[in-house]
Amino acid sequence: MGTRPVGHGNAGGMLGPLSEEDEERVVRRPRRNMRRLLPYFRPYRRRVLITIVLMLLVTGATLAGPALAQVAIDDGIDAGSVTALIVIVSIFVVIGLIGWAAQYWQSYLSSWVGERVLLDLRRQVFRHMMRLELGHHERTPTGRSVSRLTADIEAVNQLVVEGATSLVINGLTLIGVVIILLFYDWRLALAAFVIFPFLAVGTWWFRSRATRAYRATRERVAVVLSVLQENLSGIRVVQAHGRQEESRRRFRDANREYRKANMRTVTVSGIYFPGVELLAALGTALILWFGGTLVLNQALTVGVMVAFIGYLSSFFDPIQQLSQLYNTFQAAMAALEKIFGVLETDPRITDAAGARDLPEVAGRIDLDHVSFGYGREYVIRDVDLHVQPGTTVALVGPTGAGKSTLAKLIARLYDPDEGAVRIDGIDLCEVREDSLRAAMGIVPQEGHLFSGTIADNVRFAYPLASDDDVRRALDAVGALEFVEDLPEGIDTDVQERGARLSAGQRQLICFARALVPDPRLVILDEATSSIDIGTERRIEEALDRLLSGRTAVVIAHRLSTIRRADLIVVVEDGRIAEQGTHDELMRMGGRYAALYSDWEQAAGAPDTT
């Protein structure tokens, strides 16, 4: 049993939900994550600069309010000057209008930039996922990949669109208020700052408790979504076995745990934010008492004390907003770690430097001492196989023997760990992947159709195909008859995953899709397993005609498909146990003869050998 020199574990960044230690690590390195995000803003830097200027205007307009109130009281009301009061009120209105306009455009531009940054990020992640080899997608649950493009992008969206604005405006407001308080009266400022230690302790407590509470919430909502997806995708099995009540119980339990986790976040927030309000009230009361004595002693004007109380209110609001932003920031940093983990995962199937286009091929396939494994142990071991052009070769053997893996190596969905796979003597690692795909048609075991029309699905492998090309391909596999019986013919919408068609009809469409580009090489991975006997008989002649002159690799368990092959290769435990024609292998009386006898008995077919 071979052992691979290097294990193929999950690629970096795709290890599922972050553990508690991982999340702590993510939060401790926000600069790294933000540096990786900043390049996405560069194409929009002009709008970003305008947005920052508008944020400064919004902050200035907010901070101007209490100061104008102080001037109106001291220089207008107390001085008995109506003119001064009118001027101050007019300035107040103008600044309010400027602040309103600045806030509107700041909100619009920040959202505009944020949405485009996230659009670019989502597109890049999707493009990169499409470049990753089949093995990556087989190792990674679909739900996790979808989460990167949905929930994780949404977490970043809250930071980029809302969090950044809140951070800048509230941060500037907080700094501005502290400076203004000290400028107005240092004695009152020091009196207000007495509550700072209590506020700092409360904020530290909130951050530590909120971290654990929100982490638990994210974990529980993932469980809810997992149970939901599992039961909806397996609804047929659930209903067939009458397990609706069990499914409801699992979903109810998952939701109960999610509710409990949510209530812990509500409890933490319910203690902290009213606590900040209480400290704000105590601070205001302290200023009223201390400032009131200064006013009575004529050491302070009424206007200054009113402005001071106004600024003190503006001091606590930003603290609350920034405390709430902490959780958004933490979730976004964890999401960015996962997103960039995908982008840092290098595709294992790539075009080598100097790769060339695969020329028009005759169709000879050579596997020279090929070994391959998904983990540390090989599943294909030192395989030598040589297929002449125009030959139909059937790979047979027990489940798990390595038949599909061999087909994937020939299609270069994987690269061998040892040895080489060649077409017409050219190593597949030396050719451009898109040129190989153009020369090859593949039909997998499960006939997967995309939302859209039948014509769209057949044309998927060759977008330039005309409607006549589509009809010819459908006719060649015996599907045109049932397609033309549909209300809209080839323009019939198959619905999601081809739900409008039967399993056999979906597979026939997949046959047509693989054959419309007129490939020289065809790989059928148990492609007739979901087609009933009647349907299979209708397409046997079409397959004989279509595969004539082409090299075909067929993985099949059906006797009719196997008997039609020019070469039968028996795969067992990752090695080629036997190979030859049907008659030759039956005369040998070896492993193939035993397998064939078992299949024949299971199918109830007469012995034709």
Image (cartoon, rainbow, N blue to C red):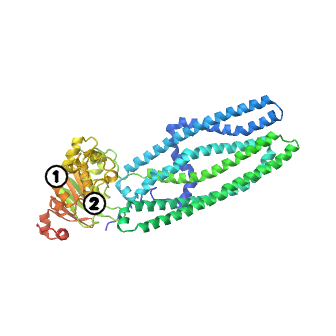
Looking at the picture, how far across and down is residue 505, in whole percent? 25, 54
Mark in the foreground, 2 or 1: 1
Q: Residue furthest front?
A: 487
Distance from the alpha carbon under mark 2 to that under mark 1 = 24 Å
Mark seen at residue 27: none
Mark 1: which amino acid? Ala
Please name the residue shown 64% across and 36% down the image.
99
Please name the residue shown 31% across and 57% down the image.
416
Q: Which residue is mark 2?
A: 404
Element on which disc 1 rests: helix
Mark 2: which amino acid? Ser
Residue 444 relative to residue 228: left or right: left
Crowd class of label 1 (few under 14; some 14 to 19; many from 20; radius 10 Å): some
Crowd class of label 2 (few under 14; some 14 to 19; many from 20; radius 10 Å): many
Q: Quadrant of residue 213?
A: bottom right
Looking at the picture, how far across and down is residue 410, in whole percent? 26, 55
Looking at the picture, how far across and down is residue 160, in whole percent? 54, 45
Residue 584 makes an appearance in the image: yes
Looking at the picture, how far across and down is residue 338, in whole percent? 48, 54
Q: Which residue is mark 1?
A: 542
**Placement of 25 over or under 480, stated as above or below:** below
**Image quadrant where one finds the N terminus:** bottom left
Q: How many marks?
A: 2
